Image: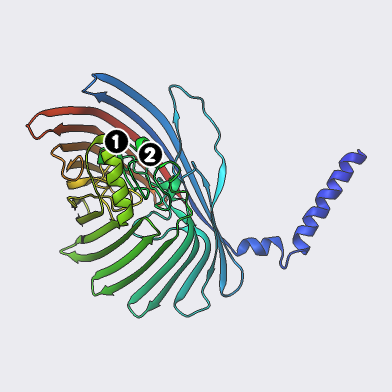
Amino acid sequence: MKKIAKISLVAAIAVAGLTTANAQPLEEAIKNVDVSGSVVYRYNDYNDRDLGSQANSSGTNNNYKVGLNLSSKVNEDVKFNSRFLVANGDGNFAGPLDTQTAADTNVGVTLSNANFGYTGIKNTTVTVGKQGLTTPWTKAEHIDGNEQTGTGILALSTVGPVTLAGAYFNQNNLNASTDAAMNGVALYKNDRVGAAAGATHGPLSGSNLGVTNAAIAGIIGDDALDGSDDIATVGIIGAVGPVTLDAWYLQLKDVADTHTIGAKYASKLAGIDLTADARYASLSFDKGVAQALDGVNNATSGTSSVVEDNSIAKLVLTADAGLIDGKLAYAKTGKDGGLTALDNDATTTLLGWTLTSNGKTDADYVQAVLGIDVLSNLNLSANYGKLKYIAAANSTTDYEEKEVYAQLVYKMSKNLSTYVRYGTYTKESTTAAGVTTEANDDTRGRVQVAYTF
């Protein structure tokens, strides 16, 4: 009994200390904390058919991601911001948890953001610390995908209709967060000497360039991007009537320079909401990076693929007439390469369900969506995508990928939505001699539930 009494006394003292040792009572401190976030569950059911080996494989998996944002007012000019994730190492879904071969497992919690926002200067916000990489090439926060983060400073200042942006990060998580669907793209620093092929710098490359990342890593050794590479970016955003314009420049030290310009138009015509979004982006590797890639490709595959310049031009048109909505999108990548984003969900590329133009050379990508509101909160859509590209710069092998799927979206409330998706994915290649080989004929399904607060 005395032991229980002592424990209760210790607990009481701890609570008293919590409310008196701080500058304000606990209940007052909680009032100054803003809470927001998301909870997403995804179930995938893929049946993949390899037409080359005639092998069939199927997989079902569970995926979870929870994001919690907490911001606390420090004083009139400073706010502390933090973000906690229940996710995997790159901020993507925890999983996939294979329902056929693995048991259910628990997932750890990580601190993704921890920074201070200063608003003491008129029309200006300065964020210092660990934060999302807010650029057109990255995804700073994503409820159902991976996130790019870095430690540094971001400043935004508005002067009339124009907003100026500038940021510098001395550390990032690009080594882990670059989208895995990006054709195996891996980043390499160019500050070391290659072990073979006469390479003087490390490359930035992907398997679509005729050489696997494993082969490159074997030649370059420990040149893999470790997240210590500096990032600097500047941008300007302005509005001219119904059109919003933006221009950005970013440098990934010793690896690449990239710029993008975009224009978005929004209007209402005869009761129809119309938007048009056009963008161009160009990414150029440092010459040493391209030369190293050329040497690696010669050493491993006997081909030369100097992908020094990458580019994309895309146009997205959407219309919403209430009962019926639609989308038409087109993207064209450069003849040398189409690696223009560090995340497939970034604005400097075009993404479907399975298809993406990112990392595809000389690509033509068409998307078409037609939806109808079955009920006020229930939308059914037909989705089509066709992507044509070549294996690498100067290659004579053409690839074609297609996806067709139906999607049913149910919005139970403003902050709770569910979608069910089912469709097919095919892939084939054609040589210069006209020989066509079908590679994939897959069927895929998905169920996702998303709650935001």
Classify 76 as above or below 200.
below
Q: Which residue is mark 1?
A: 300
**Helix, strand or loop for disc 1:** helix
Q: Work out which residue is located at the far front of the displayed protein and give it.
A: 198
Q: Which residue is at 43% across, 58% downward?
A: 133
Task: Tell me the kind of residue under disc 2.
Answer: Ile
Q: Residues within 10 Å of mark 2 (few under 14, many from 20)?
A: many
Query: Which numbered disc, 1 or 2, marks the residue that appears first in the sequence?
Result: 2
Residue 299 location, x and y as percent?
29, 38
Residue 245 location, x and y as percent?
26, 69
Q: Which residue is at 72% across, 64% downward?
A: 25
Classify 290 as above or below 430.
below
Q: Nearer the viewer, residue 3 or 338?
A: 338
The answer, for residue 367, to whether it is visible in the render is no
Q: Which mark is residue 219?
A: 2
**Helix, strand or loop for disc 2:** helix
